Image (cartoon, rainbow, N blue to C red):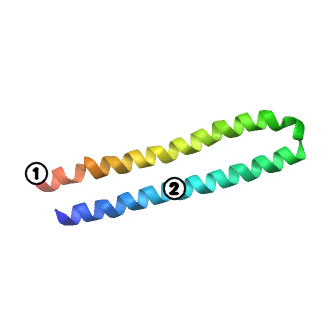
């Protein structure tokens, strides 16, 4: 039982860490590409900015889904019912 809890804690930390890393890389690439596009065509900057914020929200939503799954495993671990039962 203790090993299941320990492995779950390791898995949760990896999930949250990879979600944060993926989000950071995504935001970095998104911001860089936005600045490149706005520098090339400054008249399109407002349209590109709206699209950038939409994509930023989607990137952040993916990370929040990963955090929600990690919290599910932390507080309602489905593997403990199989071990205890």
Q: CA distance from mark 1 to mark 2?
A: 35 Å
Label for residue 32? none
Q: Is residue 17 above or below residue 73?
A: below
Q: Quadrant of residue 8?
A: bottom left
Q: Which residue is mark 1?
A: 85
* Residue 28 placement (x, y as % from top left): 67, 55
| Mark 1 / mark 2, whichever is N-terminal | 2
Within 10 Å of disc 2 (Cα), the crowding (few <14, some 14-19, many 20+) is: some
Left or right, 42 with reference to 22: right
Mark 1 or 2, closer to the camera: 2
Q: Nearer the viewer, residue 80 or 42?
A: 42
Q: Is residue 1 left or right of residue 55?
A: left
Residue at (74%, 53%) from the top-left corner?
Answer: 32
Is mark 1 in CB contact (under 8 Å) with mark 2?
no
The residue lying at 79 percent from left, 49 percent from top is: 35
Q: Label 1's element? A: loop
Q: Position of residue 39 (x, y in %)?
A: 87, 47
Left or right of 58? Residue 79 is left
User: Which residue is under mark 2?
Assistant: 20
In the rendered image, residue 22, in percent from the top left (x then y), is placed at 56, 55
Direction from residue 46 to residue 16 in the image, left or right: left
Q: Position of residue 64 (x, y in %)?
A: 47, 44
Quarter of the image where the N terminus is located = bottom left
> Label 1: how many residues lie within 10 Å, few (<14), some (14-19) or many (20+)?
few
Secondary structure at numbered mark 2: helix
């Amino acid at each position: 039982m203790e090993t299941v809890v320990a492995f779950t804690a390791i898995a949760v930390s990896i999930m949250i860490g990879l979600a944060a890393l993926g989000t950071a890389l995504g935001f970095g690439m998104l911001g860089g590409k936005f600045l490149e596009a706005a520098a090339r065509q400054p008249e399109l900057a407002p349209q590109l900015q709206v699209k950038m914020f939409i994509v930023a929200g989607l990137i952040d939503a993916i990370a929040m889904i990963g955090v929600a799954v990690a919290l599910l495993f932390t507080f309602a671990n489905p593997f403990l019912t199989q071990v205890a039962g």
